[in-house]
Image (cartoon, rainbow, N blue to C red):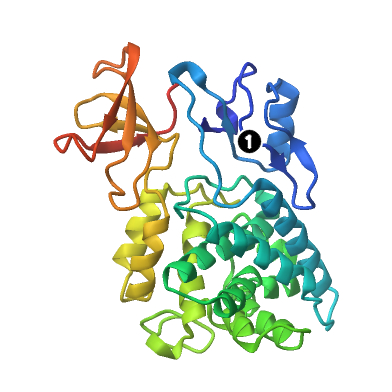
């Protein structure tokens, strides 16, 4: 299995992961052989990449940290919540949100290894819904590693899932604008933190600390954030966690105005910003759960050989297990060779390649 940009898809390729719309409808199911019509439909829906099956080099499979069904249900709940909050001063019904967070918590707590290997497939036009779900997953994984109990995990998870709910009060043409925002538009975007707090603090059964996640997730550790310019421990820890999760998911996802950054590039930015933009302890914990080179990534080694990552190690993020498929001259090997970079210390990754094709 590997990720392929939609513009690089070929008719004979077979989908390795199902694609859903934000209202839970299946757009294309796993196992479907792609046809020109399907590829065109993906483009129209704003899907920029998909996972395809590729058994030329042996079976390479990886599961999400939460089940596909759970993620789809979370998308549906998030879309319904945003649509409800856009109607005006109504109290959100938190029962569905609470159940979604319970389900995500249960699945994460049952995992032996909390390591994100997959990038969520989402439409450019449905970015906010999928973003909120992924941020909740990232935040909860971090909270689990920081030793949070069930109550604190619940408060963190609800706040992270609803951190951008205030965007429902902002005009869609501003939220989805492909070009540079004007100063006035940017000022309006910044208000989503205040709008979100106001929505949540007046909603049924939403804890005050969860509301503060919406209010403070754009505050920065050095005091350069908004809306109040808080710094350090003046920012609640839930918001400090969500801030890192928010930036990681935003940077690693395609947007209408730019291409996504690769996981190792985003982690490099976050680590470089530790102590300035982000809480160093949160960063240290967070990056243990993100694969720098996820399974299925095509890489070039310092030897000139090309391979596919088949296993990532949380304790050795820069040294995954790689399946070598091409020699230093770009010729395909007659049989693939698995190389563990934690054992071969003279070999290392020098470049991530867009594809093998």
Left or right: 212 with respect to 303? right
Q: How many numbered callouts?
A: 1
Rendered location of residue 263, percent (x, y)? 41, 49
Q: Which residue is drawn at 52% across and 30% down?
A: 1
Please determine whether, in this image, residue 324 is positioned above or below residue 152: above
| Quadrant the C terminus occupies | top left
Rendered location of residue 170, percent (x, y)? 72, 72
Rendered location of residue 218, percent (x, y)? 51, 76
Q: Image quarter for residue 298?
A: top left
Can residue 86 be seen in the rendering of this structure? no
Please determine whether, in this image, residue 123 is positioned above or below residue 323: below
Residue at disc 1, secondary structure: loop
Q: Image quarter for residue 351?
A: top left
The foreground one among 148 and 312 is 148
Left or right: 75 with respect to 135? right
Q: Residue at x 51, y 82 (%)?
A: 226
Can residue 228 be seen in the rendering of this structure? yes
Please determine whether, in this image, residue 300 is positioned above or below residue 258: above
Q: Which residue is drawn at 68% across and 23% down?
A: 34
Instruction: In the displayed orientation, state which residue is furthest to the top.
Output: 334
Rendered location of residue 24, percent (x, y)? 78, 49
Q: Image quarter for residue 213?
A: bottom right
Dot 1 crowding, Cα within 10 Å, few <14, some 14–19, many 20+: many
Q: Residue at x 69, y 75 (%)?
A: 166
Q: Write down the residue under mark 1.
A: 17
């Amino acid at each position: 299995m590997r990720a392929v940009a939609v513009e690089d898809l070929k008719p004979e390729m077979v989908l390795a992961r199902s694609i859903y719309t934000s209202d839970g409808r299946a757009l294309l199911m796993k196992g479907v052989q792609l046809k020109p019509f399907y590829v065109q439909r993906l483009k129209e829906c704003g899907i920029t990449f998909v996972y395809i099956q590729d058994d030329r080099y042996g079976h390479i499979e990886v599961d999400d940290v939460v089940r596909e069904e759970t993620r789809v249900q979370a998308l549906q709940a998030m879309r319904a919540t945003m649509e409800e909050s856009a109607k005006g001063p109504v109290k959100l019904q938190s029962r569905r949100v609470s159940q979604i967070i319970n389900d995500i918590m249960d699945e994460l707590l049952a995992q032996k290894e909390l390591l994100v290997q997959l990038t969520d497939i989402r439409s450019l036009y449905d970015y906010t819904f999928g973003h909120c779900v992924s941020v909740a997953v990232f935040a909860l994984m971090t909270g689990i590693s920081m030793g949070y109990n069930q109550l604190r995990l619940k408060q963190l998870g609800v706040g992270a899932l609803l951190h951008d709910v205030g965007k429902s009060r902002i005009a869609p043409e501003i939220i989805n604008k492909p070009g540079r925002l004007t100063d006035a538009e940017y000022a309006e975007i910044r208000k989503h933190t205040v709008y979100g707090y106001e929505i949540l603090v007046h909603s049924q059964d939403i804890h005050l600390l969860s509301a503060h996640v919406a209010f403070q997730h754009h505050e920065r550790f050095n005091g350069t954030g908004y809306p109040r310019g808080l710094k350090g421990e003046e920012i609640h820890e839930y918001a400090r966690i969500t801030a890192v999760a928010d930036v990681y998911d935003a940077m690693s996802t395609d947007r209408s105005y730019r291409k996504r950054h690769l996981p190792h590039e985003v982690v490099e930015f976050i680590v470089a910003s530790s102590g300035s933009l982000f809480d160093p302890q949160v960063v240290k914990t967070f990056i243990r759960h993100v694969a720098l080179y996820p399974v299925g990534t095509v890489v070039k080694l310092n030897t000139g050989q090309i391979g596919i990552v088949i296993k990532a190690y949380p304790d050795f993020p820069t040294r995954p297990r790689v399946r070598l498929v091409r020699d230093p001259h770009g010729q395909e090997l007659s049989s693939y060779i698995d190389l563990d970079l934690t054992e071969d210390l003279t070999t290392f990754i020098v470049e991530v390649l867009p594809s093998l094709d």
